[in-house]
Amino acid sequence: MSNSQGGNALLRTSTPGDGSAVGGGGGPAPPPARPPPPPGGGRKRAEIALLAGPAIVVFIAFVIFPVVMAAYYGFFKWKGYGVPTDFVGLENYLTILQDSTFIDALSHNGFIVVMSLVMQGPAAVILALLLNRKMRGRGLIRVLIFVPYVVSEVIVGTGWSLMLQTTGAINDLFGKIGLEGWAVDWLSDPDVAIWSLMIIITWKYIGFAVILFLAGLQSIPEELHEAAAIDGASYWQTQRSITLPLLGPTLRIWAFLSIIGSLQLFDLVYIIWGQYVSATAGTSTMATYMVLNGRNAGNYGFGNAVAVVLFIISLVIALTYQRFVLRRDTQGAITEGKK
């Protein structure tokens, strides 16, 4: 028998359901063997637990636990010491939401959020684009722009409060240059005080935005700008069509940090306007409302309730922003498990 004939004798034609298999045998073909688990799986889980465990413990101890306890104390009329016994239920939370002073403070926070983005964003982008070019004294200018950000809020607030008084340096300067009509009450006039606060915030925090944008600009390949120049694009056309779109993730991260910081603004307002003047001057925030009506009033249960409301508002805004704005950036960064 030839080799071809022997091979034909061993081959059998199988049809679906007849139970036959190639090479003989009447039973069904065995299922394919499962691939063995990757080596080192247990070790990898142990490493993750070892590295992430301390951070998780710290997060629970200093973030989750305080929030839970604040929510618990918010159900009581509590003086800040001893075991809370005067249970008031949702009374503290209802009082907050019905208090016109809190609604005013919330509106001030919203105004600060919007104006921080409007005032700091475009100015920081323009400064970053200019400082990204080769020029004399570029390093010194970067340092001078960033210095206000690292200066303590206490120093910034004290200095600006002295300059913005009715007899301060700003009004005195206007008087000496013949602009007496520009001398106003920068701190007490409700129509002016909120804008004074925005100028101070912009002066202090724009340096952080500039440095952040500069880092984003330096990550953009220079070859793209060179190709655009060869195609005849002007400098501003290149920035509009190449630089700004590629700077988008950095812009969105900065906007997120600015929004959260504006919602939690406390120190500058408290230092410059104090605990009582901020409400009448139109610069109160949710944080100053919490301190004034909680700690200073001796009602720590109410103060904890305000803190919980502030936390919930910040959390909802942060999750919404991440869901609709940062989702594309986070999905682009997470590639593991995608096919």
Image (tube, helix red, strand yellow):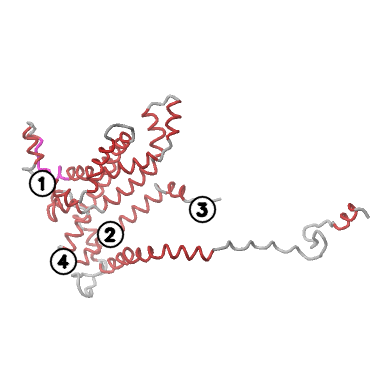
Q: Nearer the viewer, mark 2 or mark 1?
A: 1
Identify the mark at residue 309; answer none if there is no mark.
2
| Marks 3 and 2, the one that precedes in the sequence | 2
Residue 184 painted magenta = yes
Identify the mark at residue 336; answer none if there is no mark.
3
The residue at which mark 1 appears reads as 162
- Where are the magenta residues, as a range? 182-193
The residue at which mark 4 appears reads as 298
Query: Observer-nearest residue: 331 or 46?
Result: 46
Numbered disc 4: secondary structure: loop
Few, some or many C-alpha atoms within 10 Å of disc 4 (few <14, some 14-19, many ≥20)? some
Residue 277's spot in the image, x, y percent? 12, 52
Few, some or many C-alpha atoms within 10 Å of disc 1 (few <14, some 14-19, many ≥20)? some
Query: Observer-nearest residue: 14 or 222?
Result: 222
Give the amino acid at mark 2.
Val
Give the amino acid at mark 1.
Leu
Few, some or many C-alpha atoms within 10 Å of disc 3 (few <14, some 14-19, many ≥20)? few
User: Separation of disc 3 and disc 1 at Cα?
Assistant: 55 Å
Which residue is found at the position 45% from the left and 65% from the top? 49
